[in-house]
Image: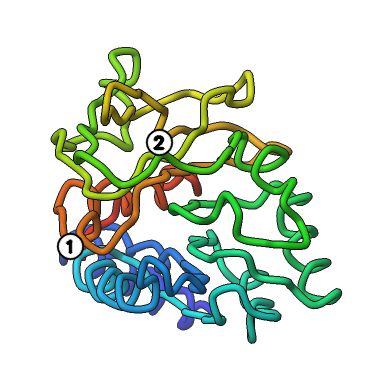
């Protein structure tokens, strides 16, 4: 027994001498993709590469058909630390709906992108109840939306390093958010201004949502950085690079 303890002590000493503490296990991210309208499969595939190349993250991806019936494998959210949801008008099976609702009821972290506000056709209340949004459709195509940081949110950790940019995609109508929502970003186009990113708490869990997320948005380094930081923020973990 003393021999085993001595070996353990030696291993700890050598580890400390070699450069410090053991690294935390990877953040387990479940990417839920089902939005052909905004090419979620392609965007999230590239975003997964970005995450796993630059952060201490391990991803699982499940994919369904935009507007379809169910998302095969969505039960994988149970084993993840955080769900990133980018789906559009999916009618979940009864068992899948129970799984997603149980995840939300348990206060698990969620990062929602673009059409996540109307991800589930048979649970449209998800937008207000969980995300804290008030999706009322969107304005027509027109001038690019100028994306800016809300003054009161300029020091929020999710926005560290974020730079305002112009999004080519129509603004979602979301005025009238939940009372506890903290707006991080707004978008202005054609004289209309709407919240386009916010945080809130749901059943004790951290929620981040952004109505941005078209293919060109994912090409913006600041947008990708914001989403990555949102994943760590939602799980109350410090940013961990490779």
Q: Position of residue 33 (x, y in %)?
A: 48, 73
Residue 17's disc number? 1
Mark 2 packing: few (<14 Cα in 10 Å), some, or many (20+)? many
- Scheme of colours in the image: rainbow
- Which label number is shown at residue 231? none
* 4 or 20, nearer to the observer: 20
The front one of 172 and 132 is: 172
The residue shown at (29%, 49%) is 169
Quarter of the view holding residue 224 = bottom left
At 31% across and 58% down in the image, what residue appears?
A: 214
Tell me: 78 left or right of 209.
right
Looking at the image, is mark 1 or mark 2 nearer the viewer? 2
Mark closer to the chain start, 1 or 2: 1
Q: Secondary structure at mark 2?
A: strand
- Which residue is depicted at the point 44% across and 54% down? 113
Residue 102 in the image: above or below residue 191 = below
Q: Secondary structure at mark 1?
A: helix
Q: Which residue is mark 2?
A: 197
């Amino acid at each position: 027994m003393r021999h085993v303890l001595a070996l353990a002590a030696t291993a700890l000493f050598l580890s400390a001498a070699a450069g410090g503490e053991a690294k935390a296990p990877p953040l387990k991210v479940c990417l839920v993709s089902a939005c052909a309208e905004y090419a979620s499969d392609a965007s999230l595939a590239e975003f997964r590469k970005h995450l796993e190349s630059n952060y201490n993250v391990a991803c699982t991806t499940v994919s369904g058909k935009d507007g379809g019936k169910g998302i095969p494998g969505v039960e994988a959210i149970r084993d993840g630390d955080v769900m990133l949801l980018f789906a559009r008008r999916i009618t979940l099976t009864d068992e899948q709906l129970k799984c997603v609702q149980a995840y939300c009821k348990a206060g698990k972290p969620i990062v929602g992108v673009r059409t996540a506000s109307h991800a589930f056709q048979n649970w449209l209340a998800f937008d207000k109840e969980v995300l804290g949004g008030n999706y009322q459709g969107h304005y027509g195509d027109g001038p690019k939306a100028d994306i800016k940081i809300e003054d009161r949110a300029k020091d929020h950790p999710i926005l560290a390093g974020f730079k305002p940019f112009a999004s080519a995609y129509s603004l979602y109508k979301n005025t009238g958010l939940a009372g506890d929502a903290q707006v991080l970003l707004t978008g202005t186009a054609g004289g209309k201004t709407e919240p386009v990113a916010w945080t809130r708490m749901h059943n004790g869990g951290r929620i981040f949502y952004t109505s941005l997320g078209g293919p060109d948005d994912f090409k913006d380094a600041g947008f990708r950085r914001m989403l990555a930081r949102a994943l760590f923020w939602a799980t109350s973990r410090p940013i961990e690079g490779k």
